[in-house]
Amino acid sequence: QLQLVESGGGLVQPGGSLRLSCAASGFTLGYYAIGWFRQAPGKEREGVSCISSSGISTMYADSVKERFTISRDNAKNTVYLQMNSLKPEDRAVYYCATIRTSYSSSYCRLDGAYNYWGQGTQVTVSS
């Protein structure tokens, strides 16, 4: 059974850090470009970051550039999202997903490009 499982979310104070993990089971994550998305209450799902299957190419939303870093360890079948300098507006449920085809900077932040999704992990930034 193909499965993606996110973990690492939680409650953190503004300015704090969290590292999210996206672990795959039932398939080899290294074959796929991966995207991280988030959805805040009452808002549409937003593409946060994406990474090619090799890890060479990455892309970030302007709202998280210089604060978030996406990476992957294909040997561990896991993709990470390091989130630093967190702000209250980063509060959301964060999801990872596998891309349908191959990485492209033109669509890797569009949720329609992805097929398999994890269940999400909640990130709350509050003092």
Image (spheres, grey):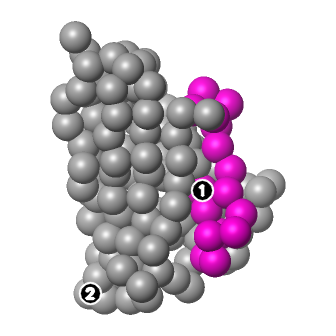
Which of the labelled discs sits on residue 50, or is there none? 1
Name the quadrant containing residue 11. top left
Which residue is the site of mark 2? 1
Magenta span covers which residues?
A: 50-65
Q: Quadrant of the C terminus?
A: top left
For marks 1 and 2, give the CA distance.
Answer: 24 Å
Above or below 42: residue 46 = below
In the shown orientation, is residue 16 left or right of residue 74? Answer: left
Category of crowding for the residue at label 1, using alpha-carbon neighbours closer than 10 angstroms: few (below 14), some (14–19), many (at least 20): many
- Closer to the camera, 39 or 87? 87
Coordinates of residue 96 in the picture (x, y in percent): 42, 58
Category of crowding for the residue at label 2, using alpha-carbon neighbours closer than 10 angstroms: few (below 14), some (14–19), many (at least 20): few
Above or below 66: residue 81 = below
Which of the labelled discs sits on residue 81, or is there none? none
In the shown orientation, is residue 78 left or right of residue 68? Answer: left
| Residue shown at 45% from the left, 74% from the top | 73
Task: Report the amino acid beneath label 2.
Answer: Gln
Task: Report the amino acid beneath label 1.
Answer: Cys
Q: In the rendered image, is residue 110 in sight?
A: no
| Residue shown at 56% from the left, 78% from the top | 32
| Residue shown at 42% from the left, 58% from the top | 80
Coordinates of residue 52 in the picture (x, y in percent): 65, 69
Q: Quadrant of the N terminus?
A: bottom left
Residue 30 is inside the magenta segment: no
